[in-house]
Amino acid sequence: MAEVMKTQVKKFAQGKVVKAFGNLIQVEFLGDIRQGEVAMVLTDNVRLKAEVIEIIGNEAKIQVFEDTKGISLGSTVEFSGDLLEAELGPGLLSSIFDGLQNPLVKVADVSGFFLPRGIYLNPLDRKRHWEYEPTARVGDILVRGDTLGTTREGRFIHRIMLPFNRYGNYKVTWTIPAGSYTVETVVAKAMNEDGVEFEFTMLQKWPVKNALIQGEKIKPTKMMDTGERIIDTQFPLMKGGTFCTPGPFGAGKTVLQHHLSKYASVDIVLFIACGERAGEVVEVLKEFPHLIDPHTGDTLMRRTVIICNTSSMPVAARESSIYMGITIAEYYRQMGLDVLVLADSTSRWAQALREMSGRLEEIPGEEAFPAYLASRIAEFYERSGVIALKSGKPGSVTIGGAVSPAGGNFEEPVTQATLAVVGAFLGLSRARSDSRRYPAINPLDSWSKYIDAVSEELNHIVENWGAMVKQARKILFASDEIGKRMEVVGEEGIAINDMITYLKGELYDFCYLQQNAFDKEDAYCPLKRQIPLFQLIHYIFDTRFKFESHDQARKFFLDLQTRIKNMNCMSMDSEDYRRTHDQIKELIDGAKK
């Protein structure tokens, strides 16, 4: 909901193009402008959106978000007086926007499938009616973020809030009766402390590069379960936390993000394609309207917003797409909802920063990235978190960024800057991907800072959960070390106890950390199924086995692997599942010392 301004004529600055270098345009201007202000460059009868990124005297450097073909010396530039803003209100869910929040479906309807330059449509439908129920009453004293009324957006109660750009106290002087209205209908009026009355509608705007937050940031306490055993058990995530998924080309970053967007236990998913290949985004657009959310039974698109700025679209808009997505996520967080932001990929966003930094002739940092790369990445991830709201129900934004290091080199600047700020690192391995291990997360390289916090939450279900997870990790490392030794001395060159430790680690990897993405039971493994399976694995870890030879040990563990993997594909409620589980326990007990 944006306030309806009093009618007054405001004169904005204008300028002329004096120099151009790619999408960096230098403008000589008259009037007052500010950093981050939106400008329009006029050329070939179209208006191209741009943003002020540097001001020196009466000259400004602006980055144009479109193809700059046709811009020439003396082209007119008009400044808007506004920062780059997101339009917020009911109707965002199920939408597909570009990096500037253009509704791509409507743009395609207007212009066809080949999108021309200079078309900017309203992100929210101005003709659609919403059933509005006022909650604020005349005489109420409100502050930014307080509820004026509500409407229903899908299965969510969408709170119509006092605009976040209105600071101080506002006394409600009028509210509209309940009914069906458009987003531009004035639904309330309020007077500020100076006695000036403002009108409010169901939509508001907010600068995307400023964090949108009203309330106290608190420590994350709730686990975000994903249905991926390797994540939920070994490298857990928290609602309101951060994580990254670095990996080389073909390691499965996009597949993992698709899984998280389908199955993560959150209310809303923001999928930001900031530089990914168009084919991967098309896959999301084709799949999501037909996929069912396992938590609600509704289609996935009903809880999803897609910001689409693929590698074939203007490079400069990658930065705006990142900030546009996180701003929409923060808006829904203020309603007490849990939001997951998936950015794919932050490496290509960083490459756009590097390109612009080079054109600005700034002093380069490592690998020619700008010196401020680490701070920009930190600023983005710091916009995650849990907010304590007046209603008593907290809202959260969880951020997960895919990183695409060249050649899979995790020592490159973008990966290192990301690892310095995130709470969990899910490192993807090309070798594991090539050997058809899904998900291809390397359990030896990855880590999570949330294990102890998640253990506190799960201790009421399984005592000493954290200790069990840490023991499993120790066995993985011991198994890997023994495996490397076996490559040198052979299987017969190691002790039988070392061989058993190696086989326990292999069983844990194959039967628990890996899943079958093509099997409807194993593709999504909720906690109620993970916990008894992990307890069974832990029972195997604690069992002291008695084998006469290395061959006998290997044969036993291969049989055990087969039975557990078969059980993973059975319905948990079936008689076959229970019978197989009991048979596995009997098999283990029969091989004890």
Image (cartoon, helix red, strand yellow):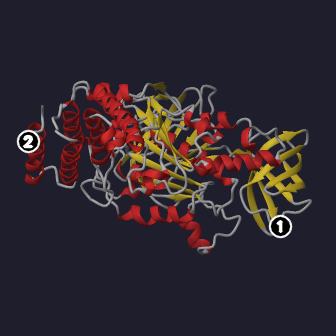
**Could you tell me which secondary element the residue under label 1 belongs to?**
loop
Identify residue for label 2.
586
Position of residue 126 measured from the top left corner of the image (x, y, whole percent): 53, 59
Query: Can you identify the residue that label 1 sits on?
Result: 70
Report the label total: 2
Residue 319: percent from left, percent from top? 65, 48
Q: Residue at x 33, y 57 (%)?
A: 517
Determine whether, in the image, residue 56 is placed left or right of residue 357.
right
- Splitting the image into 4 quarters, where does residue 22 fall? bottom right
Where 570 falls versus 416 (above or below)?
below
Q: Residue at x 70, y 66 (%)?
A: 117
Is residue 90 something that shows in the picture?
Answer: no
Q: Is residue 521 above or below residue 487?
A: below
Inspect this view and state whether residue 190 appears.
Answer: yes
For the residues carrying marks 2 and 1, which lies nearer the camera in this image?
Answer: 2
**From the viewer's perspective, is 151 left or right of 363?**
left
Give the distance between the C-alpha atoms of the residues marked 2 and 1, in whole angstroms: 77 Å
Which of pointers 2 and 1 lies earlier in the amino acid sequence? 1
Percent coordinates x, y for residue 570 in the rendering: 17, 55
